[in-house]
Image (spheres, rainbow, N blue to C red):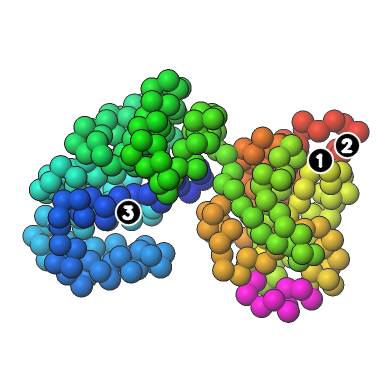
Amino acid sequence: MRNHWRRNSVIAILFSSATLAVGQAQQQSGANISALGPDYQQGKADLDAGKYEAALKAFKKANKQQNDACAPCLLEMSFVMARLGDTKGALNSADKALASAQTNELRAEAHAMRGDVLLGQNDEKKRSEAESEYRSAVHLNPQAPEHHLKLALALLKEVKDTEGKDELNQYFQLAPNGKYAAYARTLLANPRRAREDYAPEFSFTTLRGDTITLNALEGKFVVLDFWATWCPPCRASIGELKELTRKYPRDKVVLISVSADEEEDKWREFVAKKEMDWDQYRDSAGKIQKTFGIHAFPTYIVIDPEGIIRQRILGENPQQSVVARLKSVLTTLTADKGKA
């Protein structure tokens, strides 16, 4: 099954808050986290390191040691399964967590987890079901700000903007300076952000020393090229990218190459040798790759002048050039400003 959360910044927000909320629910309920055992702690460490398969194995082991009735373990399992694209397993684990939960805080978290998984399926019927799950979470634990934020997201996705804004205001009352306050303000100002795949904000300094932010690029098309010098298809696409810079004016279409290279000298030498004279950034720590959910090279992401992701292109296609595949998005440019 396609893992929609990886492609949608709104769903990414949901999942980035899910595991945090599990810990908060445990604290609110007075649960002794250390009593969950070393396997649970190992699972958390693996999860923090992005080792999802290892984390799932550890959480399953911790849950088994508690007779398959460890609600926190099951919630973490649900979270990891959803990340891995196992929707059925994620919902099943959330159901088991709900049945095993001993407090309203953990019961609320189980409902919220189900809501996250359902909303991530990008289906109209599932959105309605997600709304119901979030309402149950709010009812059981009305003091948890993230539950109100998630309910707001579901409502805004259903174009119930008035109700959604009410829930956003509830979030602000509970957490005016909370972790997601800035994001909640963008939703309040523009509810469409919950329905469109807006690109996440980013900021970095290019090879030339220029600082680039998404906000500063507003009004332009942005093509992000995720690549590496050790990737043969990436190297093969350089000529096509040069063609792209020739066909479209740089004040209308901005090309940014984001490299996964770890060796700076090798990267600099390659860029200079190939005369890649557009914006270049080396993302050696993987921060920008993680932000956009990049797992294959090359990957091209097209962002429109409003900041909405309009297209993702994975890999090379010998039958069609990069420029040709980007054409469907760039057709809003006038004919005299570039034809593919």
Q: Main secondary structure of the magenta part?
A: helix
Residue at 84% across, 72% down: 273
Checking the image for residue 337, the label placed there is 2
Q: Quadrant of the N terminus?
A: top left
- Range shown magenta: 261-269
* Element type at mark 2: helix
Mark 1: few/some/many CA within 10 Å (<14, 14-19, 20+): some
Mark 2: few/some/many CA within 10 Å (<14, 14-19, 20+): few
Checking the image for residue 35, the label placed there is none
Judge from the rendering whether residue 239 lies leftward or rightward of residue 74; answer left or right: right
Residue at mark 2 to residue at mark 3: CA–CA distance: 47 Å
Which residue is label 3 attached to? 19
Is the Cβ of the residue at disc 1 closer than 8 Å to that at disc 2? yes
* Element type at mark 1: loop
Say which label, 1 or 2, has the lower sequence index: 1
Mark 3: few/some/many CA within 10 Å (<14, 14-19, 20+): many
Residue 268 on the magenta span: yes
Which residue is label 1 attached to? 252
Quadrant of the rendered image containing residue 42: bottom left
Say which label, 2 or 3, has the lower sequence index: 3
For the residue pair 10 and 323, the one nearer the viewer reads as: 10
Q: Nearer the viewer, mark 1 or mark 2?
A: 1
- Residue 302's spot in the image, x, y percent? 67, 44
**Up/down of 233 relative to 337, above or below:** below
Residue at mark 1 to residue at mark 2: CA–CA distance: 9 Å
- Residue 58's spot in the image, x, y percent? 25, 67
- Residue 215's spot in the image, x, y percent? 67, 44
Judge from the rendering whether residue 102 lies leftward or rightward of residue 294; answer left or right: left
Residue at mark 3 to residue at mark 1: CA–CA distance: 40 Å
Q: Quadrant of the C terminus?
A: top right
Q: Nearer the viewer, mark 2 or mark 3?
A: 3
